[in-house]
Structures are given as C-alpha cells and as structure tokens.
Image (cartoon, rainbow, N blue to C red):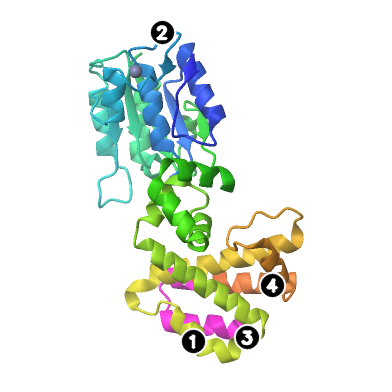
Amino acid sequence: MKNNFSNIIANDELCSYFAKAIEFSSLSHAYILLGAKGTGKHTLARLVSAALSCENKDDENASLPCLECNNCQKIMNGISPDVIYVSREEDKATLGVESIRFIKDDVAFFPNDSDFKIYIIEDAHTMTAQAQNAFLLTLEEPPKYAIFILLCEHTENILETIKSRAPILRMKTPQRDEAVEFLKSNYPSVRTFINNSPNEFEQIYLASGGSIGRILDLINSSEKKQILQNRELAQKLIESIAHNRLSSDFAEISTMFSQKRDEREKIVAQLSEIQGAIRDLITIKKSDEPRLIFFTDAKYTEELSYSFSVKKLIQIAESTEKARLALLRNANIKLTVINYLSELI
Ligand SMILES: [Zn+2]
C-alpha cells in the first residue's frame, strides 16, 4: 500500500515507519514527535490519525490515508470526534493537570467513527510534573483503541517513565534547496516572495532554522520586519568590528539596539542574532563544509572571517552571552548595551 503522507517533506523514513506500523498493526500506544516549531509535527500527527481511521485502509490499491473518505475528511478538517487535541490554555506557559484529567475521563468512552481514538497533545514539553504523573496513570493501562501523540519541541522535562513508554521520533528539517522547491510548488504567494525578494527570503530562511512552518509564519507576520532589522544590526556590528570602526560607529550602533523598557525580549533576540553571526565566523574558520546559520553568502563570510582570530571571536561571543544573561536577569538596558559595545572596541 502506498503511503500518502503528502505535505510532509524531509521525513520519508518517519512516514514509512508509521505506514508500516499501521499496516502491520504494530503501533505503540504513545509516541513523542520531537521537532522545532513548524517542522510538521501537527500535520504528521493528523495524517497518522487519518491513516488509522481511513475507511479504505484495507484496500490494497488505495493510498493511505486516502484523504477522500468521510473519516479522512473529518480528521483533516479537524472535526472528528475521535481525534482529540489537548492544548495549553492560551494565557498559560504550561500544560496543567486539568487538561490531562480530561483525557483520563474521556478515554473511557469508545471511539465514534473508527477503531481508534487519538489524542494529540500539543506543546507536550510544557506539561507540568503533576500533569505528566497523571498522564502516566492513563499510559500504564490504556484502552486498546487509544493512541497518544505527544508533540514536543524538546524532551528535557519529560519524565523517563513516559519516555520509556513512548518512542521518540525526530522530525527532520529539509535541506535549503528542498525547502525552496517545496515552498515554490505548494505556496504561490511564497513563490512570488522568493522571486521578488530573494535576499529577504534567504534571511527569513536562516532565521527560521529551516523549518517550513516557521518560514510560512515569518513571511506573513510583522515579526519579519523585526527579524530583518535584528539581522541588519548584527551584520553592521560585526562589519564595524572587522574594519576597526566601532569607535566611530558607536552612537549609530547603540541606537540600533532596542532601548525601551518593554523591549527586553527584542534586545535579547538581537544579541542572539549576533551570536549566530559569530558562530558562523568560527565555523567557517574551523570546518571544511560549514553549514551557515546567519550569513547568506559563504564567500563573503570567509573574507570577513580573515579580520578575526578565533580567540577574538570567542571573546565577542562571551561578551555577547554576558550581556544577554544580564538582560535576562533584569539589568538596566541602556547600561548593558553601552558596557557591551565598549568591551568590543
Ligand atoms: Zn480515507
């Protein structure tokens, strides 16, 4: 049977893993889908749910999921009673025990349309310890029809007892060319953006960490402008240090940093971009095949790197991290910026 996990790129192995597990009924009761924001965790979880409930599952000639039967349509449109999304309340940073207690009660009811009831737990990495312990009780003796898919950006806080019952499956991000090809063929507006503003696109691509969902979010959001400004600042600062011009550029560069009281997060993001640029310069000195995360032009980056010793780059990285941590600890914004830039001269 042909697996039909369309709209998922760079994760063929993962898709065939699920297709086989469904075909041979060898699914685990729980999975951890691990990947950065926008790597396709939701889409894959939804497609796996559709494949499990597809009415044409036993037809060897059909694709799985067929995406046409009633069950597939309901699941893809997010209206199936058998696919339940469990998410954080909007104003909360963690997924609390109340949401998990809901699962414990709800799972006792049989599925409506198919043989499975699938719980997609969003932002599962934010589950509190109490929530995880409550979840464990359900996971220890789940009904035959229950499948839990935990969507996680990292697994640092996930209890070992959950990890041992839920295989961790990592979502991969596509290579740059593969991502561009995919975006161009699936999103006409993005194709136009790539064609009209190739340089902006490259910057957005790098800022997204290669994640398709993140690229789509950024292209259409007001965050795009901020990211481009942050990157411009980082590049200007690095070039200014490289050409020994920081003393004369000091006033201009210091005003490019966010200075307002409520812009602490913005300035932390600006420092993170600078760290990305420094990381690229060190990588290009040390590696034969560097994968750049900040600069868009490898030749230019290599030339720029000649102006720095590795020791100097490490010093800049350390000063940047020191300033970032100071801001996270509530230090005065203006003073931190001035101290930081003075250290770099
Ligand atoms: Zn179907």
Q: Is residue 94 left or right of residue 166?
A: left
Kindly identify which residue carries mark 4.
Answer: 304
Frontmost of labels 1 and 3 is: 1
Q: Which dot, 3 or 4, sits closer to the camera? A: 4
Q: Position of residue 274 (x, y in %)?
A: 55, 69
Secondary element at tag 1: helix
Q: Position of residue 156 (x, y in %)?
A: 49, 44
Q: Which of the numbered marks, if any, corresponds to residue 345? A: 3
User: Could you tell which of marks 3 and 4 lies nearer the N-terminus?
Assistant: 4
Of callouts 4 and 2, the N-terminal one? 2
Q: Residues within 10 Å of mark 1 (few under 14, many from 20)?
A: few
Which residue occupies the foreground of this view, 105 or 40? Answer: 40
Q: Is residue 245 above or below residue 288?
A: below
Tally of numbered tags: 4
User: Circles 4 and 2: CB distance less than 8 Å?
Assistant: no
Q: Nearer the viewer, residue 307 or 158?
A: 307
